[in-house]
Amino acid sequence: MITEDAIDRILGIFKAVWDTTGHPAFYDDKTGEIPTSDVPWARATIQHATGQQSSLAGTSGTKRFTETGTLFVQVFTPVGDGSTACYRLAKLVRDAYRDARDGELWFRNVQLNEIGTSGAFRQINVTATFSYDEVR
């Protein structure tokens, strides 16, 4: 798998589940107005961490490189409902990655991290460690 395919698949899981909510989603490479009103929204970010060679070249001359990193999905909801909406939406995203089955892309340590309240929004992050192999 190449890096661009991995990114598309990682974000594709988020898009598929978040689109069911009808709320705005934001990505690092897309511009747009962040909501300032009483609308839940989320932002997905991918950060690669390591890319190490994990095999020697065989007779074919190809090598395997294992890429790892972290997916961050920040979920924001308006304050005032006891964080009910924020937990519901964050768990929806978390469970999508816990349930994801892809033979080439692995998700581990998928969890919720409560960030707190800032201004009009409550924030909970969903984080997941991912890994995949690139053969060259």
Image (cartoon, rainbow, N blue to C red):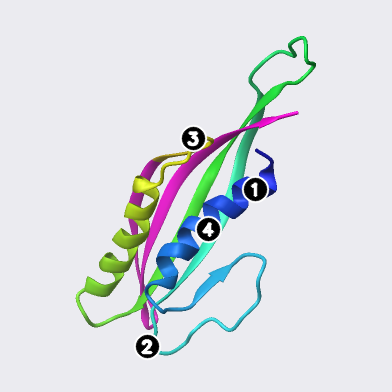
Name the one closer to the observer, 30 or 57. 57
Q: Nearer the viewer, mark 3 or mark 2?
A: 3
Q: Residue at x 35, y 76 (%)?
A: 77
Label 3, label 1: how far apart the Cα atoms are: 14 Å
Q: Residue at x 39, y 73 (%)?
A: 76
What segment is highlighted magenta in the picture?
109-136
Kind of residue at badge 2: Asp
Residue position marked by numbered label 3 in the rendering: 103
Q: Nearer the viewer, mark 2 or mark 4?
A: 4
Mark 4 falls on what kind of element? helix
Residue position marked by numbered label 1 in the rendering: 5
Q: Which quadrant of the figure has residue 42?
A: bottom left
Q: Earlier in the sequence, mark 1 or mark 4?
A: 1
Image side of residue 63 versus residue 93, left or right: right
Mark 1 falls on what kind of element? helix
Q: Earlier in the sequence, mark 2 or mark 4?
A: 4
